[in-house]
Amino acid sequence: MSTALLELEHLGISFGALKAVNEVNISLFQGERVAIFGPNGAGKTTLFNAITGLNIATEGLIKIAGVDITKATPFARAAKGIARTFQITNLFFGLTVEENLLLATRGLRPTKFSFWKSSNSIDSENAIVESALERCHLKAKRRVQVKHISYGEQRQLELAMSLTSSPRILLLDEPAAGLSAVERKVMAQVIRGLPRDLAVILIEHDIELALSLVDRVICMYQGQIFAEGTPEEIRNNPKVQDIYLGRRTGA
Ligand SMILES: Nc1ncnc2c1ncn2[C@@H]1O[C@H](COP(=O)(O)OP(=O)(O)OP(=O)(O)O)[C@@H](O)[C@H]1O
Ligand SMILES: [Mg+2]
């Protein structure tokens, strides 16, 4: 069997006495799309923080393509192909959509502090920006200041910015939170249209939306994984219905 792109082995993150993430084991393969479900406080965002290096794991290991990155800096992890979006939008509102993307594109490059650029590097930056605009349905808004686009478009832009580093693993933390029904549909199309070789982990409270987007679902409760399976298996799992879907039967 080939090596997983991302492996979490017996991962634990404690805040004092609280085990926010406890004994979590996950293998993610290239191109796989996985949703993480769980009620508020289940440890989903903390898990993302541990993968990206915002929180350092207190137990266990994190590997990318077999290489241990448990203690690596966030920058080193990003350079290995991990990108994320945040639950709260993180944009420059006074700049245009295109300018935000250009800044994100320069963020990871060795030339980021140099003023003079070769025309080759400008061409390649422009190609990255174009592709991100296209994938995230933002071409028509490229010259509009971020404060003047809708909230849904701001979330699309955030996703577009995370694509500019050409990641191998993309972590999406509630990309549809706060969106209208129409905006959710656009976001779902954007996620469906992501590069097929990109592995995606999606945290999402809109279960029907998430089930339509992923190959596999992992359910967390109080820091632990308590169920895992295909969207169909998860839909029919009575424990999941009890703890999360709120469809308790015979109660
Ligand atoms: N920096 C921190 N210091 C102390 N406790 C924290 C910290 N970050 C998270 N926690 C706690 O860890 C637990 C898991 O939080 P987390 O944000 O990962 O939950 P979540 O599953 O993402 O929830 P939600 O669906 O509300 O976003 C919660 O009890 C939270 O209060
Ligand atoms: Mg969260």
Image (spheres, rainbow, N blue to C red):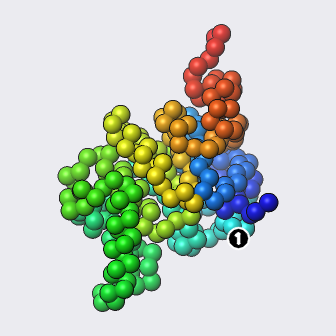
**Does the rendering let one see residue 215?**
yes
What residue is shown at x 69% (from left), y 39% (from top)?
A: 228
Name the quadrant of the C terminus.
Answer: top right
Most extreme residue toward the top is 250
Q: Image check: 227 left or right of 120? A: right
Q: Is residue 43 above or below residue 83?
A: above
- Nearest the eye: 8 or 140: 140
Is residue 50 something one can see in this rendering? no
User: Residue 79: x percent and y percent?
Assistant: 54, 73
Against 207, is 155 above or below? Answer: below
Q: So how many labels did they put on this image?
A: 1
Q: In the picture, which quadrant includes the N terminus?
A: bottom right
* Left/right of residue 14 with respect to residue 23 in the rendered view: left
Q: Is the distance from the Cβ of mark 1 to the nearest ligand 1 atom less than 8 Å?
A: no
Q: Identify the residue shown where x is 36% and y is 52%.
A: 156
Which SS class for mark 1? strand
At 22% across and 54% down in the image, what residue appears? 147
Position of residue 174 relative to residue 248, above or below, is: below
In the image, residue 202 lies at what x, y percent?
A: 54, 47
Measured from the top left, where is residue 214 in percent x and y?
57, 44
Q: What residue is shown with label 1?
A: 67
The part of the image, by quadrant, that contains residue 30 is bottom right
Looking at the picture, how far across and down is residue 195, in whole percent?
50, 59
Q: Residue at x 69, y 38 (%)?
A: 229
The quarter holding residue 42 reads top right
Query: In the rendered image of this protein, does residue 203 appear above or below residue 75?
Result: above
Few, some or many residues within 10 Å of mark 1 (<14, 14–19, 20+): few
Q: Amino acid at mark 1?
A: Val
